[in-house]
Amino acid sequence: MEVKLKNNEKTVFICSSCGYNSVKWYGKCPECSEWNSFEETVIKKEPLSKSKTSKTMTAHTSVASTISSIQFPEHIRLKTGLSEFDRVLGGGIVKGSAVLLSGEPGIGKSTLLLQICDSVCKYGKVLYVSGEESAAQIKLRATRLGVNSDNLLVLCETNLSEIMPEIDVINPTVVIIDSIQTMYDEDLTSYPGSVTQVKQCAMRLLNKAKANDMAIMIVGHVNKDGAIAGPKVVEHIVDAVLYFEGEKQHAYRIIRAAKNRFGSTNEIGVFEMVETGLSEVENPSAMLLSQRPRGVSGSCAVCVVDGTRPIIAEIQALVSPSYLPNPKRMSSGLDYNRSSLILAVLEKRLGYRFSTQDIYINVAGGLRIDEPSSDMATALALISSYKDIAIPDDVIVFGEIGLAGECRSVSHVEMRINEAVRLGFKTIAVPHRTLKNLKKSFEGVKIYPVRSVFDLLKLIDA
Ligand SMILES: Nc1ncnc2c1ncn2[C@@H]1O[C@H](COP(=O)(O)OP(=O)(O)OP(=O)(O)O)[C@@H](O)[C@H]1O
Ligand SMILES: [Mg+2]
């Protein structure tokens, strides 16, 4: 059916994955290479503003000011009652800021936002706008989480023209939108969840929040690749973008900031999903090591630094003879290409024949490691499994591997060693170049310098 366009309207095709727009339809997006992602949308042509057409320098209202004369408002931080969440936000929710929280379905986004309401309600009213669940469902969850404040107001609505006046009437301190993909603006012809709707709704809500100096927390769904579904533009206009991660089969959840205008993006918050909601894990290292098998080959401890916090994790490798023409390779929690590089270095430098083996690498506990400091531990776990020799339980290794098989330095060595000592590790293998930077000695602990992958063999007498 052909849609009749008004004079001030035109049709454009917008990629639902990245927001790229074009006057013609494409099967594959030229920007993000996604197939079949273009949606036809009717948009209003913007009239050219007078200031652009006029050549004279007459009346205009925006005046630039000197940097020294600008007054900045005090950043009042609202404590959420979950110190792990506050840490990721940079110390709490900044009044008047916009936060985008995204994650896979069922990971616990609604749980987290409802749970923090209890503490945030002490600062003023909180409006929880849900487009996905009924008021009864939210009440059920709130009862389970023990949230029951008269300052918490629930609105089950998806139409922005209903939500906006309600925000004005209530004038809350924090607005929660669960989720942006369900909201719609009736002035637009596209469906809720489409790029234009998500973009428009996010813009309108953010403008409202900034104008009323209230914080806004927006839930955004992720697509199958883990990116926030809808236009990237939402990421640009909010102050912080948080990703809620975790393996479905584990109770552990990690929140990390991909962007934060009011804090570091390196911090992570670790939680465990329990009956009463998300409980904070203050000692993630002990949690990750709690189920470590003893005396079994292929398990190696590593210390990674996420933000300012050292975390001890366990890398597991399983190398077993393959009966397939193309042996299997699987890497979970570690970058696949990085794992392939480590395998190639071990093949070349130590002469191992991995081409006849199926190889599985996993970071226990559902943690994802992006740091190259885990290279040496991955290599040692692979060697241990290949040779079927267990790594002693009190050995921990960290260091980056270069293509020549050399062990390269990593940052925060002392911090990593301290954490390893705290958890009872007695042999700590570190890149040899970092030894001279160590300011203090560690009693009762053997610091083992590693020059190359050859040195790893001595750790397990291989
Ligand atoms: N009684 C319970 N005990 C423990 N965990 C529970 C319980 N009920 C729900 N959960 C956990 O809460 C999760 C659902 O949380 P929540 O609804 O907040 O997720 P969500 O990210 O908002 O999902 P969606 O994207 O579907 O809205 C479940 O996957 C489950 O792990
Ligand atoms: Mg939800």
Image (spheres, rainbow, N blue to C red):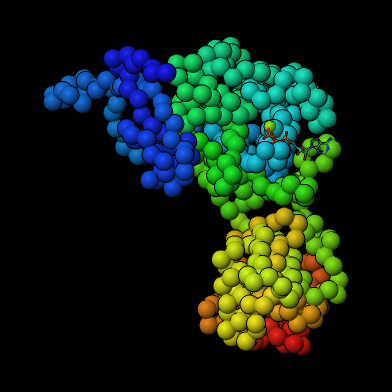
From what the image shows, is residue 458 above or below residue 325? below
Q: Quadrant of residue 402?
A: bottom right
Residue 77 vs residue 389: left or right?
left
Residue 55 vs residue 47: left or right?
left
**Nearer to us in this view, 448 or 3:** 3
| Residue at image coords 52%, 78% | 403
Residue 360 vs residue 219: left or right?
right
| Residue at image coords 70%, 85% | 457
**Nearer to us in this view, 207 or 125:** 207
**Nearer to us in this view, 130 or 289:** 130
Residue 377 vs residue 188: left or right?
right
Q: Quadrant of residue 321?
A: bottom right
Q: Residue furthest left?
A: 55
Residue 361 placed where, x, y %?
A: 69, 66
Q: Give the quadrant of the C terminus.
A: bottom right
Quadrant of the displayed image that contains ligand 1: top right
From what the image shows, is residue 324 above or below residue 73? below
Residue 159 placed where, x, y %?
A: 56, 17
| Residue at image coords 53%, 21% | 184
Whether residue 353 is visible, yes or no, is yes
Q: Quadrant of residue 72?
A: top left
Whether residue 209 is visible, yes or no, is no
Residue 131 placed where, x, y %?
A: 63, 23
Residue 388 placed where, x, y %?
A: 79, 80
